Image (cartoon, rainbow, N blue to C red):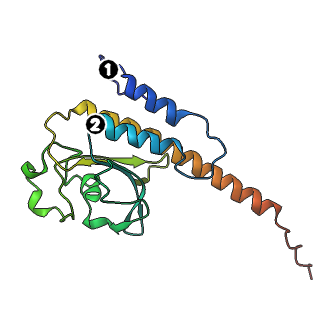
Amino acid sequence: MAFHEPDYAPDAFEVRVSELLVATPEGSDQLIDKAVPEVLRMIREHLKMDVVFVSEFVDGQRVFRRVDTAPTARVIEAGQSSPLEQSFCQRVIDGRLPRLVRDLAQEPSLPELPPTDFPIGAHLSTPIVLSDGRVYGTLCCFSFAPNPELTERDLKKLELSAQLTARKINEGLARAADKAMANWSLEPQAPPAPRR
């Protein structure tokens, strides 16, 4: 995945993420296979964040599908959900909140943001867009304290990871569809009704 910048060259982090997420699936039926948790940990550590997660948008809810946190930052868990409209994720998707926020306290839209049960200082978020154009959810990370060192390059790393995660989800959806089709074709079919 190239970003089409003349001087852009992937660093070791981006190469490792690509290796993990482009690897051939090992027969897993999960939409987000076992490589994704390792990628999330790498993102969190590399960007010096407290929490990173993959969310899915389901029936007006944001559902946390995968979560990686620093040991002292367990503020959300996989499987939890909350109203999508009351999330930073929705605001990033519709452009009300930038994808890269170094210091949330300085963000002009702060008064309109939904309250959280924990402090958010820095925040990065990007959509996970599937091959059919549908937004699956987001790949987000945040720290409790502001982080003035975050760069556009850091956001590009998150975007690359989201693109590769979307690829894994697409592969999982395709496997699930193939399996469903195979099961359907194996079911006994009723004989056609006799003609009168």
Is residue 16 visible to the viewer in this orientation of the structure? Answer: yes
The image position of residue 147, as x and y in percent, is 16, 40
Secondary structure of the residue carrying tag 1 is loop
195 horizontally vs 69: left or right: right
Q: Within 10 Å of the Cα at label 2, are there few (<14), some (14-19), or many (20+) other Cα atoms? A: many
Q: Quadrant of the N terminus?
A: top left
- Name the amino acid, label 1: Tyr
- Name the amino acid, label 2: Leu
134 horizontally vs 22: left or right: left
What residue is shown at x 32% (from left), y 56% (from top)?
A: 74
Q: Which residue is mark 2?
A: 47
Mark 1 to mark 2 CA distance (whole Å): 19 Å
Is residue 2 visible to the viewer in this orientation of the structure? Answer: no
What residue is shown at x 20% (from left), y 60% (from top)?
A: 118
Which of the two marks, 1 or 2, is nearer to us in this view? 2
N-term-proximal mark, 1 vs 2:
1
- The image's mark for residue 116 is none
The image position of residue 111, as x and y in percent, is 9, 62
Secondary structure of the residue carrying tag 2 is helix
The image position of residue 16, as x and y in percent, is 45, 28
Q: Which residue is mark 1?
A: 8
The image position of residue 75, as x and y in percent, is 30, 59
Q: How many marks?
A: 2
47 horizontally vs 1: left or right: left
Q: Are marks 1 and 2 in contact (CB under 8 Å)?
A: no
Residue 195 position by quadrant: bottom right
Q: Within 10 Å of the Cα at label 1, are there few (<14), some (14-19), or many (20+) other Cα atoms? A: few
